[in-house]
Image (cartoon, rainbow, N blue to C red):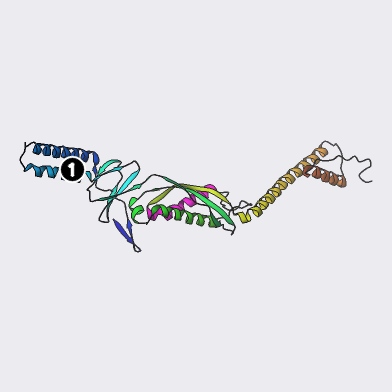
């Protein structure tokens, strides 16, 4: 069954009319036995010469039957053609038989696991990044895979690269404010979108994608060092922010406890000095050095 679409004759898989190879194998054995027995009888003079026609017919029939056998492994199919016309697909494993003039093209319908080459892509913000993907795919329509594309395995490789480039340019590599969908921070969501993109691209070849994901995702070498410094700076700022927030809370607690328990009464100037000293102690990167004040705060 073919459907015309923009100049492309689209094929659709259908079941082929084939026979069990076991039954035909038994028929072949009978024909061989008959041919051999007839020839032996003719050689011993037990039959007339006209039986030579029967022996020849049995031998010819045996050769005809023997030419139609083929074997299918589990998760393997055979597309049957007659003079270039598609006649159906056989997916039944085991010993099978068709008419000898029918051509059988075997194709694996097992799952294939492919890892793409690392390619350089510009993300949404124009930063060059390196990406590689792992894809698990299989053939679902043997007619489309064999007759609608030139080489379905090469087709998969090309479409993988095109899909990775499309998804890579659709999102930024990272977002330090965590307000956008990113390649690095949203693996599951981006992976599902990559799978949908691959299925849409490979449907013309009768191929589906069961699983996919990124095996390599990094900034390109020319900007990797600059981006690393940026990440380090962002990490330092975030750590400082957390440290300051904690220090302010501790200072507030200390002043509140001193006032609640009447340990000491502090005026605004002493309160400011104490806050300054506590912030230095809590936020400093080095161990504090005690200083003994022999005078007073105002001298």
On the rendered image, what quadrant is the N terminus found in? bottom left
Name the residue carrying label 1. 62
Where 34 falls versus 176 (above or below)?
above
At horizontal 78% and vertical 42% (from top left) the residue drawn is: 282
Q: Nearer the viewer, residue 232 or 95?
A: 95
Where 163 falls versus 96 (above or below)?
below
Coordinates of residue 113 in the picture (x, y in percent): 45, 46
Q: Nearer the viewer, residue 141 or 128?
A: 128
Coordinates of residue 209 in the picture (x, y in percent): 43, 49
Q: Can you tell which quarter of the image residue 257 is in?
A: top right
At horizontal 82% and vertical 38% (from top left) the residue drawn is: 258
At horizontal 71% and vertical 48% (from top left) the residue drawn is: 236
Q: Which residue lies furthest to the bottom in this view?
A: 7
Q: Nearer the viewer, residue 61 or 179?
A: 61
Q: Can you tell which quarter of the image residue 172 is in?
A: bottom right
Where 129 falls versus 289 (above or below)?
below
Instruction: Name the dominant secondary structure of the magenta segment.
Output: helix
Let me know if residue 203 is in the magenta part: yes
Compared across the picture, whether 92 is left or right of 33 comes to right
Count up the numbered dots: 1
Badge 1, how many Cα within 10 Å: few under 14, some, many 20+?
many
Let me know if residue 123 is in the magenta part: no
- Badge 1 marks a residue whose secondary structure is helix
Q: Which residue lies furthest to the left in this view?
A: 48
Compared across the picture, whether 25 is left or right of 112 comes to left
Coordinates of residue 156 in the picture (x, y in percent): 43, 53
Coordinates of residue 218 in the picture (x, y in percent): 58, 51
- The boundaries of the magenta stretch are 187-205
């Amino acid at each position: 069954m073919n459907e015309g679409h923009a100049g492309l004759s689209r094929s659709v898989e259908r079941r082929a009319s084939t026979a069990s190879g076991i039954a035909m194998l038994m028929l072949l054995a009978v024909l061989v036995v008959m041919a051999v027995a007839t020839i032996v009888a003719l050689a011993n003079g037990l039959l007339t010469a006209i039986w030579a026609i029967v022996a020849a017919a049995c031998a010819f029939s045996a050769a005809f039957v023997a030419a139609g056998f083929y074997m299918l492994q589990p998760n393997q199919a055979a597309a049957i053609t007659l003079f270039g016309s598609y006649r159906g697909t056989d997916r039944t494993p085991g010993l099978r038989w068709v008419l000898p003039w029918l051509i059988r093209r075997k194709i694996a319908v097992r799952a294939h696991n492919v890892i793409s080459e690392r390619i350089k892509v510009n993300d949404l913000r124009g930063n060059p990044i390196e990406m590689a993907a792992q894809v698990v795919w299989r053939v679902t329509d043997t007619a489309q895979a064999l007759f609608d594309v030139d080489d379905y395995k090469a087709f998969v490789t090309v479409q993988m690269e095109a899909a990775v480039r499309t998804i890579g340019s659709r999102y930024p590599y990272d977002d330090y404010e965590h307000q956008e969908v990113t390649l690095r921070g949203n693996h599951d969501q981006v992976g599902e979108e990559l799978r949908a993109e691959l299925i849409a691209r490979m449907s013309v070849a009768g191929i589906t994608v069961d699983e996919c994901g990124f095996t390599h995702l990094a900034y390109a070498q020319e900007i990797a060092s600059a981006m690393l410094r940026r990440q380090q700076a962002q990490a330092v700022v975030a750590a400082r922010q957390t440290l300051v927030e904690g220090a302010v809370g501790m200072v507030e607690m200390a002043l509140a406890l001193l006032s609640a328990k009447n340990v000491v009464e502090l005026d605004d100037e002493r309160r400011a000095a104490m806050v300054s000293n506590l912030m230095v102690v809590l936020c400093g990167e080095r161990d504090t050095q005690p200083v003994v004040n022999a005078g007073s705060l105002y001298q």
